[in-house]
Amino acid sequence: MNGPHTAPGHDPGRPHEASPSALTESDILRDYRAAFQIAQFPMALVGAAGQILAANAALGLLLGVEPERLAGVRADAVAGLGLDGRTRGSYHAVLRGHSDRLRCTRRLKHADGHSLWAEVTVLPTPTEDSAALLTVLDISERRDLQERLRHIQMHDPVTLLPNRALFFERLATAVSDSATGRIGLCFLDLDGFKAVNDTLGYRVGDELLGAAAQRLAECATGAGGHLVARLGGDEFAVLVEGSSGTKQLTDLAETMLTALQRPFDLAGQRLAVSASIGVVERESATTTATGLMQAASTTLYWAKADGKARWTLFDPERNAHRMTRQSLSSTLRRGVDRGEFTLEYQPIVGLADDIVRGAEALVRWRHPQFGTLGPDRFIGLAEENGAIVPLGRWVLGEACRQARRWQVEHQGPPLFVSVNVAVRQVWDSDLVSDVAEALRVSGLPSGLLQLELTESAVMGSAGRPLQALQALSDMGVRIAIDDFGTGYSNLAYLSRLPVRALKLDGMFVRGFRTARHLNPADETIVSSLVQLAHKLGLTVTAECVEGPAQAERLRRIGCDTGQGWHYARPMPPDHLATLLAGRD
Ligand code: C2E
Ligand code: MG
Ligand code: MG
């Protein structure tokens, strides 16, 4: 392909006939002026004092003004450059030749009243006649498109409400703005929405969300135009900036609950829904966006747990409790590894002769942060997260080791040790081999080990748990039912399991604490329980024996052993050793 330089008839070797040097200065100036006037790009030349020297036709068209009428007008007024101090400073710097460019976006007004978005640029000119060139580019379309895109990005197509992204943006701004003062949040979740989706389909589900969103938006508008957003699924949130206190938020929550109570007529169906709301209100300076959201989500969870169809207000105390639970739960395993647990022992005493027969091992946690904690604080958590398996294994090993020491160091009839076993240890770990290992390592005879299981752990036992109980019993380990009477209390059933002892729950004994407050019904029950247990070949230990009157009555009834403050509180192993030394 031929380029212009090799076009036929044109000899690159010869000088041009009309060379640029043939144009005079004034020719060029005239051409530049013409180019300036017809350019599509809206422009103006600005003088050193900031007045427009000349504006081109495009600029006139953009602003709806004859270009000649712009001459002499202040450029900063035309292009909106005097509005804020920083832009004004930069503009003057360009005019004085101290800066080589100013660019900013401005909203300008057309002479007919409509407004437009413009990108304004001011560049210094290298001539003496003018100081700067002002260009004004109409970017309204781009801006509109950007705004439409942003709207799509920030809104939820199902409910048309602001979405999570917009909500968090507004929340973050509100929290970081010191002018916000107090701030409140209602975090709402429809109850049973999943069932609507599952039974009536997603279309109806979406319609319900849309209709619920509309009612929520009406409530928020009525209460002062607060931001309502759909955070996802069936979760909505209302942000109250500059709130006046918890009352304002709980009132709003109440209004929303009431609004949602009216049935929804959708797809030929009449649907009733309710919602749960977590309410948080605090000073914005003391919180963060994530802190507020976390509090709201915890509170929503409480509202659900408390029975749904209600609002619940954030409660710092309840939260502290939850945090402690969380922190305990997450440090349990490490605590076992670091040897933070200890055992105390509570004597189990013969009722007829007051002789110590055994001791129950009760675990305590010497927590580095929270001090010594009783088992009620952590056994449930350990069962939930599975830490009970390593913890229970440690308890077994330690209790057997201690019992063997008593056996070796003290004369007289040997003491048995009674160890609590959680349901999950029977199901989730190889309890039989753990017990065998503890006995082997400690050298404790299996007959000196008793395991305490609750009724619920052994009831309905079939398969693996029953096999485990049988294997343990075959090894010579005694199985006892702990807290007997609080569960199913099916003695006939228990007798078919390899169970050898019952520990009567403290509530039975509580009934006959003193002679004056004797409850004959309790005594009759305990008496017949003991008789029946004996017939079935089970021994009976009474728990929570707190006074001599109870001990005497239990002895008369024929109960075998007792345990409780009347005899001794749980104690460290060396205290028990001293007690035993006194016995010897
Ligand atoms: P439990 O097995 O019923 O243990 C008896 C509880 O009653 C002990 O509470 C004991 O301190 C308390 N107690 C003893 N005598 C009296 C009395 O005269 N009056 C009253 N009111 N209470 C008395 P503790 O040590 O707080 O243990 C609570 C529960 O934690 C135990 O109840 C047991 O179920 C569980 N537990 C303790 N250690 C372990 C363990 O190593 N593993 C498992 N899985 N659970 C354990
Ligand atoms: Mg027990
Ligand atoms: Mg008990």
Image (cartoon, rainbow, N blue to C red):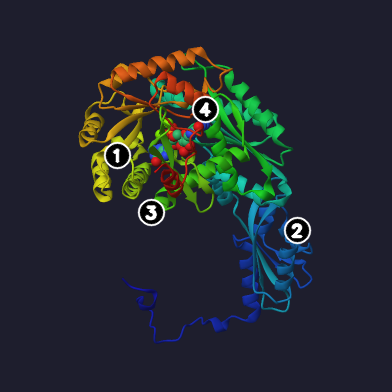
- Which label's residue is closer to the chain start, 1 or 4? 1
The residue that disc 3 covers is: 337
Q: Amino acid at mark 4?
A: Pro
Crowd tier of the residue under label 3, counting other residues whose Cα lies within 10 Å: few below 14, some 14–19, many 20 or above: few
The residue that disc 4 covers is: 548
| 435 displayed left or right of 399 | left
Task: Please state which of the two labelled residues, at mark 2 or mark 1, is closer to the viewer.
Answer: 1
- Numbered label attached to residue 83: 2
Indicate the secondary structure of the residue bearing disc 3.
helix
Residue at horizontal 48 percent and vertical 46 percent from the top = 328
Residue at horizontal 62 percent and vertical 26 percent from the top = 256
Identify which residue, 272 or 304, lies in the foreground. Answer: 304
The residue that disc 1 covers is: 448
- Mark 2–mark 4 Cα distance, whole angstroms, equals 91 Å
Task: Please state which of the two labelled residues, at mark 3 or mark 1, is closer to the viewer.
Answer: 1
The C terminus sits in image quarter: top left
